[in-house]
Amino acid sequence: MKLIQFKNYQEEAISELQAKTIKQLGRSGNRTMVFKSPTGSGKTLMMAEYLKRLDDSELQKFSFVWAAPRQLHKQSKNSLTKYFQDCQSLKCSLFSDLLDNRIRSNEILFLNWESINKENNLVIRENERDFYLDKVLSNTKEEGRDLVLIIDESHFSVDTDISTNLIKDISPKLTIEVSATPSLKDEDASIIVDIDDVKEEGMIKKSIVFQDGYENKIKNDQLITIREKGTDILVLEDALKKRAKLQNIYQKIGKNINPLILIQLPDRRTQEEDALMNKIIEHLDKDHSITTENNKLAIYLSEQKENLKNIAKNDHEAQILIFKQAIALGWDCPRANILVLFRNWKSIDFSIQTIGRIMRMPEPDEGHYKEDALNHGYFYTNLEDIKLNDNQAKHYLSIKKSTKTHDTNLAVESCHKLRQRGKTRLDPSFVQIFLESAEQYNLKEKLNLSDNKISQVIFSQQEYSSLNELQEAEKGKKIKYNLENTEEIQKLFDLFSIKALSPEYSPEKRSLKRLNYSIYKFFENELEIDFSKEFSRIIEIALDERNSKHIFKVVDNAKLKYKNSQEKKANKLIFNKNWDIPNEILHLTDVNEMDCSKSIMNPFFHASLSKPEIAFIKYLDNSEEVLWWFRNGDRDDTYFAVPYILNNEDHPFYVDFIVKFKDKKTGFYDTKSGITVTDAFASGKAEGLEKFLKNNKDFVGGIITNTEKDNTGLWKCFTKKIKDYKEGNLDNWEAIDF
């Protein structure tokens, strides 16, 4: 199996799962852990790698039970079986696969959670063969093995009295709840993957845009949709128009991705639901030539399945999929961009699980696209209101959109900063740096590939007559022998890598695995030796005394280059020479609307404003000289920033306001008050803004403040040389009059 390059947040979560598992298993009593990770973050992949790495630990005294709702346990079993195909000691089994009525060491039993909650189910019902769950668990424990219970998609499973009692009956040494929205309370440890980290890696979309083009509001945790024409067909037409726009953008950037509309029906089946589905199918056929016959329509229902083969592939023909929630649990299709719910739902509790269907990016390794419309999911419905039932959903759903009211062509140079990584550990970029260093060093030609043996040294038999003599044993006779045990070879290789990492990088598992992967990749690329099949062979070559010195040299060279690249990254600003005010800005639900007459973004939303900012906005709105103003943000390349230097490092300074005057001049102003005024000059921000303004005669602005503490006085702007600034003195400041 090809080695997987994990994202940074995935490596961190896997390592944390390992560490906390070892800690909890070392304590008395039964323990619980919660693994909370957003939909689309790769929870199953992380759990698989976590279990695989536990196999290298002293965990032979444990057996595992993996419980999941509906048919998700079979899906998980198939995924992990494939993942563990090169890991002989981890076995994945269904209940019918168990041997000798027990779960063996490092065997994972996959169970359907609902089935073991039913009294008459064969899995739990006593029988003459003694092949039922209680007996299997008892037999397993009698052999001295404790149980580790993993509850997948736990929000569907554990929040009932029956489930609580069932966990007590299983009595696992450790219970791990895995979900985007966990249900267990009073856990002993938690591992939480931040949704922002997943977004930053481009694994999932930035937000879900609700009812694009329609007005919405939130009242008492209810999302209220204001629609004049809330019919089923018009909702469907909205979704189809959006799909066509997205498809055109994909084609424009050369991506062979066919965006998919998901139409989710309630689990119940009534004449009303059947009539709606028939109406949808008829409309799609008559008005859009979308049918099951031409493969553009797919159906995923218990009673009907059409055009589902390879539907998750980005270039699949299907444009629309009709499905039900129950059937599709655990089903992923990253090219799905749009979700549609009709009024026959009556009402819905809108959670992270609902929007999870359209959160994934179709090319997660590519990250987010430059065309921002592709980085969001879209949700359409004619429901009158939706309850937002968890905080994560509230902070993910974009229901508020500001649109630019004036054409602009500022084309100014802006900057933003890359996130700092890799100061104390190796990030994924190290792999390529190692491979390049190996090529420059000509490592391939210097390696000796014949008669490779790994030798170790141990002390020979000797007799000591005193403690003093024993203390001198280090100088005694030693025997050299060849290592052949696979486990010992792997441990020796890990020690080799730890030594190679030191002293610049701590030998924590993420960096250790990264270095090992780099070496494996070299052998795969240059010597065509597949790690998954010949890992012992690779290690034997690498640790051979004739070769190890050369690999050490390459590692040293790579570490130096990596360190230099990280230092450059940490201080590097990314420049956009043609920044302009965005055509639209999407806002999450936790923002406020403010009535403003001259904001270029309409409506004007903000998360929070300082008192000086509010006062300045009112001042701008009342000015006859102001054509429009833009309240700038403070993140990534969406918003405008000028470079400034602090402690010999480059930083972006996001200026508060951009103002367009009727005389065609453009103002860049940053509101300050009190100690923040001094901070602007002391930090270098004021100087950075000054340098920027000098580059264009039509640019004006600077640091501004109000002469009164309550912001009712004059607005003044510092237009002198930075050296002329005097703390607490506004004599050198110029009064502005718009």
Image (cartoon, rainbow, N blue to C red):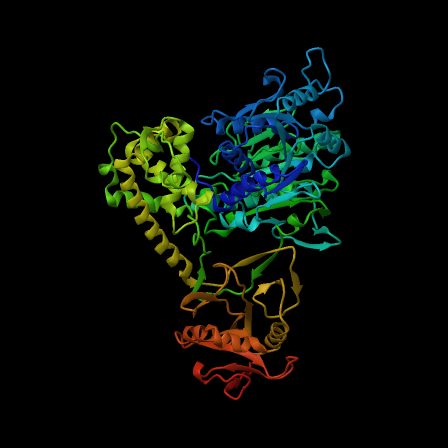
Q: Is residue 45 left or right of residue 523?
A: right
Which residue in the rendered view is the most extreme toward the left? 445
In which image quadrant can residue 728 be found?
bottom right
Q: Is residue 398 left or right of residue 449?
A: right
Q: Where is residue 426 in the image (x, y as percent from the top left)?
A: 42, 48
Identify which residue, 587 or 489, lies in the foreground.
489
* Quarter of the picture holding the C terminus: bottom right
User: Would residue 238 be seen by someone viewing this image from the given angle?
Assistant: no
Identify which residue, 240 or 8, lies in the foreground.
8
User: Would residue 714 be seen by someone viewing this image from the given angle?
Assistant: yes
Q: Position of residue 161 (x, y in %)?
A: 77, 34
The residue at 52%/78% (across/down) is 678
Count of numbered circles on the image: 0
Q: Position of residue 324 (x, y in %)?
A: 65, 32
Which residue in the rendered view is the most extreme toward the front? 465
* Quarter of the picture holding the N terminus: top left
Identify which residue, 611 or 435, lies in the foreground.
435
The residue at 40%/60% (across/down) is 572
Which residue in the rendered view is the most extreme toward the top? 128
Q: Position of residue 585 (x, y in %)?
A: 56, 58
In which image quadrant can residue 112 be found?
top right
186 shown above or below 464: below
